[in-house]
Amino acid sequence: MTNEHVVAALDLGSTRTCAVIAQVAGDVRAPGAKVLGVGICRETGVRRGVVRDIDETTRSIVSAMHDAERMAGVQVPGIHCGIAGEHIQVRTSTGLASVTAEEISRPDVERVNEVATAISLGQDRELLHSIPQEYRVDDQDGISDPKGMTGLRLEVQMYLVSVQTAAAQNLRKSVERAGYRVSRLVLEPLAASLAVLTEEERELGCALVDLGGGSTGVAIFKDGKVQHIASLPYAGSHVTGDIVQGLSVTQADAERLKEKWGTAYAPLVDPDESIGLPSTPGQGVRQAKRELLAHIIHQRLDEILGLVQGEIEKTGFTGNLPAGVVVTGGGAHQPGIVELAREVFATPARVGMPKRGISGLVDSVQAPRYAVAAGLLLYAARNILESEAAKQSGVGKFFGPMKRWLQDFF
Ligand SMILES: Nc1ncnc2c1ncn2[C@@H]1O[C@H](COP(=O)(O)OP(=O)(O)OP(=O)(O)O)[C@@H](O)[C@H]1O
Ligand SMILES: [Mg+2]
């Protein structure tokens, strides 16, 4: 196994840091990752995608990465790292270029892509992803690959995702202080979508909802393209906070109650069932209806999914996402979440389990809360396989800035 074929993913969440090391598997058409090692650290200096404490984040990365490296038996210098948060901005931009030769060539496509990307994002922003949405050749639109076509005028519509420079720098700084290098920052909901969505779902139309601890990431797809990305500052910790208030328990107990007895969809609970509540000596023995706990969780998640529905409305795809909603992240572990999502969105819904392309220590990562890490591995694997394929086919010498268009999403 050469070292270039080992990749590392780092998901810096609000509730835990998760590092996964894998060996590149599959081929360029179906990239895969064979998981070799996993490390989790439950102390984190990150809140809602933003580093709040560099030292704590660094310690967390060291701990998670060292555990993953020990398990894998390899050391990985470069890391694919997830990024999220409200500082993410998206916009579309168009690029126009004239075609002089007989047919449209790769450099023409490269040129028009460059034009669409060469816009000012503002001083404090850096470009994270530039995803060509579609090309137009003269009057014909909806073209996904214009190479080889004949025309005079080539136009591209580009989807640009940018992040706050400071947020990206603080992530890089934490990773570097931990002794690693960031190979690439990848937007978390897009990474998760690589691991859990099928091509058909992206084609028909669906929304990926990454229900985390501090934030909820949303990515909406239609016609095989990403149509909208958003990050909402509400997630599992708000549910826990409501339980703290509603049942007068500590944060840790609320978390335990939620995971042990909680349900996201109250009608699933037997109204007669009671659960024991942790109590102080003064409170004495306490009980609560399990239905009450379910109501608290149901209400808050209903509100959060309602906000996601608002994002879907912004794209104008309400009632037009036939493949429905796919939920990932820790919140997807909550029983009843699928029933609640079906009701809120009035579409099909399922939990997104990272399975496709993932092999090796699958038991350690085949859970919705690993969707981001698994997606980062697949993204890294695809980059490596695509560069190798390009080198072999001789396209390599053209691979300069072009690389990014080929290798970024979808
Ligand atoms: N079995 C479970 N039942 C209910 N909730 C759960 C379960 N497991 C995890 N969660 C919730 O999922 C949340 C953590 O999810 P996740 O690990 O995806 O978040 P994160 O990546 O650390 O945070 P973020 O992405 O928001 O920065 C917590 O609020 C936790 O309570
Ligand atoms: Mg997360």
Image (cartoon, rainbow, N blue to C red):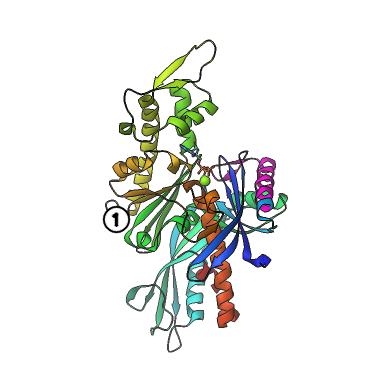
Dot 1 corresponds to which residue?
322
- Residue drawn at x 40%, y 27% as measured from the top left: 293
Q: Nearer the viewer, residue 42 or 58?
A: 42
> What is the span of residues highlighted in magenta in the rendered image?
45-69
What secondary structure is the stretch in magenta mostly built from?
helix
Q: Nearer the viewer, residue 365 or 167?
A: 365
Q: Amino acid at mark 1?
A: Pro
Residue 123 located within the stretch drawn in magenta: no
Image-based side of 292 in relation to 170, left or right: left
Disc 1 crowd, CA 10 A, few/some/many (<14, 14-19, 20+):
some
- Residue drawn at x 56%, y 39% as measured from the top left: 15
Q: Position of residue 122 (x, y in %)?
A: 54, 56
Element at badge 1? Answer: loop
Residue 51 located within the stretch drawn in magenta: yes
Image-based side of 272 in relation to 8, left or right: left
Q: Is residue 121 visible?
A: no
Q: Position of residue 112 (x, y in %)?
A: 47, 74
